[in-house]
């Protein structure tokens, strides 16, 4: 009779740790905070949050190349969900122009619906991962994969908000260029 050893786990990698969960919760909290605050839309910095999520996701790891058709299907479904939610959030984020203090600025702020979509996507990502684990489709997704999927969503949202803001006269750079100052 073969007795399983502690190294015979169901996962190919380490499970998501409590520390990773706390980091994810903190990052989600920060993202929600940023969404609910008015901020100027500037073209050159529109992907900053997406890049932060992507870099942290790549650094911490927790994802692997899909090996089966079912793993590929879940990856594609997850990416499609990120894109669709990002586009919906980009469309539903409040964007407006303001000429107060003699300067033309364009601002945005998330709404209760955009926050709910964000949280719903995070819950759906955990749901897909849990389903994949218990259906024995995949047992090696993790923290980094969640962050990458959030980065994809944030990038699509940021681009759509930028396009809407640009139509209202948003600045492309945060500081005036030398040519603009002359």
Image: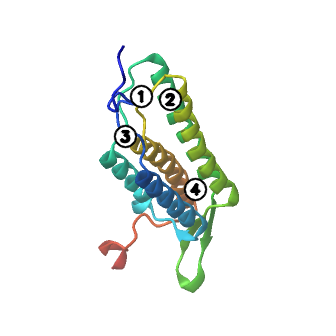
Of circles 3 and 2, the one toward us is 2
Q: Could you tell me residue 155's position as x and y percent?
A: 47, 49
Within the image, what quadrant is residue 36 found in? bottom right
Q: CA distance from mark 3 to mark 2?
A: 14 Å
Instruction: Name the quadrant of the C terminus.
Output: bottom left
Name which residue lies at 69% across and 59% down.
112
Q: Is residue 173 above or below residue 8?
A: below
Name the residue beneath numbered marker 1: 10
Is any atom of residue 35 visible in this view? yes
Of circles 1 and 3, the one toward us is 1
Name the residue beneath numbered marker 2: 133
Q: CA distance from mark 1 to mark 4?
A: 47 Å
Query: Could you tell whether 179 is left or right of 104 in the image?
Result: left
**Mark positioned earlier in the residue sequence (1 or 3):** 1
Residues tagged 3 and 2 counted as in contact (Cβ below 8 A):
no
Please rate how many residues cluster around mark 4, counting C-alpha atoms within 10 Å: few if below 14, some from 14 to 19, many from 20. Answer: many
Of circles 4 and 2, the one toward us is 2
Residues tagged 1 and 2 counted as in contact (Cβ below 8 A):
yes
**Mark positioned earlier in the residue sequence (4 or 2):** 2
**Mark positioned earlier in the residue sequence (3 or 4):** 3
Name the residue beneath numbered marker 3: 62
Any mark on residue 53, and which?
none
Q: Nearer the viewer, residue 181 or 3?
A: 3
**Mark positioned earlier in the residue sequence (3 or 2):** 3
Name which residue lies at 59% across and 78% down.
99
Q: CA distance from mark 1 to mark 2?
A: 9 Å
Secondary structure of the residue carrying tag 1 is: loop
Of circles 1 and 4, the one toward us is 1
Name the residue beneath numbered marker 4: 164
Please rate how many residues cluster around mark 1, counting C-alpha atoms within 10 Å: few if below 14, some from 14 to 19, many from 20. Answer: few
């Amino acid at each position: 009779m073969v007795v399983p050893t502690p190294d015979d786990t169901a996962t190919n990698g380490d499970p998501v740790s409590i520390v990773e969960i706390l980091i994810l919760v903190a990052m989600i909290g920060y993202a929600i905070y940023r969404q609910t605050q008015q901020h100027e839309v500037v073209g050159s910095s529109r992907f900053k949050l997406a890049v932060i999520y992507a870099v942290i996701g790549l650094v911490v790891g927790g994802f692997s190349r899909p090996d089966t058709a079912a793993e590929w299907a879940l990856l594609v479904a997850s990416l499609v969900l990120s894109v669709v939610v990002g586009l919906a959030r980009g469309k539903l984020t409040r964007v407006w122009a303001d000429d107060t203090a003699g300067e033309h600025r364009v601002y945005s702020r998330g709404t209760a619906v955009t926050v709910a979509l964000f949280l719903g996507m995070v819950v759906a990502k955990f749901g897909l991962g849990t389903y994949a684990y218990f259906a024995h489709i995949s047992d090696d997704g993790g923290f980094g994969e969640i962050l990458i999927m959030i980065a994809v969503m944030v990038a699509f949202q940021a681009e759509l908000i930028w396009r809407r803001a640009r139509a209202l006269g948003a600045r492309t750079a945060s500081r005036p260029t030398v040519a603009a100052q002359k």
